């Protein structure tokens, strides 16, 4: 999307006199830009498109915090790239740590395929990212708010505090004061398993309190549902892959994330399910066991 298109959307969202909804911009692009606007805050901009763009990007500059533990912080370049960075980081899977200016609006962490990473936040809460996952931390994280956004899977060890710790996703949100839990946010689904304490799972204006030893799931636009506990949900933290009656496509997707490979298998297995645990095995060993169990061949696709 061009800079002038963002400026038109900014003018429309700020309810400027004479500003019209930009119908020539696709609905999906408008919604994505509106999301970036919501993260930046609702500000009113002057009539000039150029000034509106500059203000829109400038308002995304964070208050610097000196104690955020970064594995890496994405560098800043031109101020006009800020909104685009928020837009792309939220709606496109990051391919590297080189997105321009993303740190101006949020602090971004990710773990590559085949990699796991632990992050310590300013309040000493710890988050372990599973392979192929991303995490955005709001720039003013601290006493007034403890908000993050998750795409992928992570294990949370939240330090108790009177300020709620909130995990947002496209499907819903999780709110806690202090607890330990595993969360998965893929597409329109958000699920969790609680290890310690209790968690409030929210979606479609409804809330569900999930206690330790139980789980919950919410789909975009639907109320959250309670599910039985699954202590294997965070086995990945210890280098394990554990599945309980999981659809084969989900099993393959997890293997691909865990080892950073692409796996091929017969399409007629798409409706099959698998239960089993692989404890610190190589990818070749996992695929050999899976092939024997399912009576079909699972193999790593050659690199392109």
Image: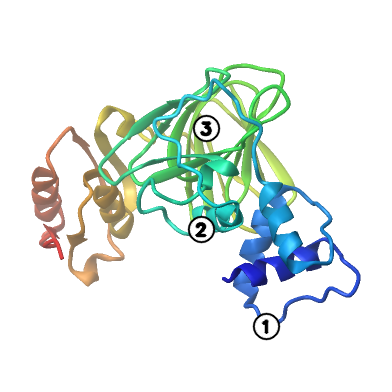
10 Å crowding of disc 3: few (<14), some (14-19), many (20+):
many
Give whichever of discs 1 and 2 has the lower sequence position.
Answer: 1
Give whichever of discs 2 and 3 has the lower sequence position.
Answer: 2
Residue with the mark numbered 3: 214
Distance of label 2 from label 3 (alpha carbons): 35 Å
10 Å crowding of disc 2: few (<14), some (14-19), many (20+):
some
The residue located at (25%, 43%) in the rendering is: 114
The residue located at (79%, 63%) in the rendering is: 13
Q: In the rendered picture of this protein, how many numbered marks are placed on residues?
A: 3
Query: Is residue 83 shown above or below 282?
Result: below
The residue located at (66%, 17%) in the rendering is: 161
The residue located at (9%, 44%) in the rendering is: 285
- On the question of residue 243 being in view, the answer is yes
Query: Is residue 241 shown above or below 260?
Result: above
Residue 247 in the image, given as x and y percentages of width and height: 33, 56
- As drawn, the residue found furthest toward the right would be 17
Q: Callout 2: helix, strand or loop?
A: helix
Residue 169 in the image, given as x and y percentages of width and height: 57, 48
Q: Callout 3: helix, strand or loop?
A: loop
Which is more foreground, mark 2 or mark 3?
2
Locate the N terminus and report the quarter of the image it occupies: bottom right
Give me the disc on residue 24: 1
Which is more foreground, mark 1 or mark 3?
1
Residue with the mark numbered 2: 88
Asked if labels 2 and 1 touch by Cβ distance under 8 angstroms, the answer is no
Distance of label 1 from label 2 (alpha carbons): 20 Å
Give whichever of discs 1 and 3 has the lower sequence position.
Answer: 1
Query: Is residue 301 shown above or below 75?
Result: below
Distance of label 1 from label 3 (alpha carbons): 47 Å
């Amino acid at each position: 999307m061009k800079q002038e298109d963002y400026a038109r959307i900014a003018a429309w969202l700020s309810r400027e006199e004479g500003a019209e909804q930009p119908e020539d911009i696709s609905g999906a692009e408008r919604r994505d830009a509106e999301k970036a606007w919501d993260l930046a805050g609702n500000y009113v901009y002057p009539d000039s498109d150029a000034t509106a763009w500059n203000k829109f990007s400038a308002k995304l500059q964070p208050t610097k915090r000196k104690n955020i533990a970064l594995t890496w912080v994405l560098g800043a370049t031109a101020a006009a790239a800020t909104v685009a960075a928020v837009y792309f980081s939220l709606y496109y899977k990051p391919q590297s740590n080189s997105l321009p200016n993303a740190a101006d609006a949020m602090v971004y962490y990710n773990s590559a395929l085949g990699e796991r990473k632990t992050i310590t936040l300013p309040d000493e809460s710890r988050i372990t990212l599973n392979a192929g996952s991303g995490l955005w931390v709001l720039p003013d994280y601290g006493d007034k708010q403890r908000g993050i956004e998750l795409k992928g899977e992570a294990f949370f060890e939240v330090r108790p505090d009177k300020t709620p710790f909130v995990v947002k996703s496209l499907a819903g949100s999780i709110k806690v004061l202090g607890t330990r839990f595993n969360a998965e946010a893929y597409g329109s689904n958000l699920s969790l398993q609680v290890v310690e304490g209790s968690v409030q799972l929210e979606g479609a204006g409804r809330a569900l309190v999930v206690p330790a030893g139980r789980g919950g799931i919410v789909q975009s636009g639907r109320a959250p549902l309670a599910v039985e506990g699954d202590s294997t949900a965070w086995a990945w933290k210890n280098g394990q892959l554990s599945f309980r009656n999981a659809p084969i496509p989900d099993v393959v997707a997890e293997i691909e994330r865990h080892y950073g490979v692409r796996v091929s298998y017969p399409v007629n297995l798409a409706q099959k399910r698998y239960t089993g645990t692989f404890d610190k095995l190589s990818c070749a060993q996992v695929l050999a066991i899976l092939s024997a169990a399912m009576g079909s061949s699972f193999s790593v696709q050659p690199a392109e």
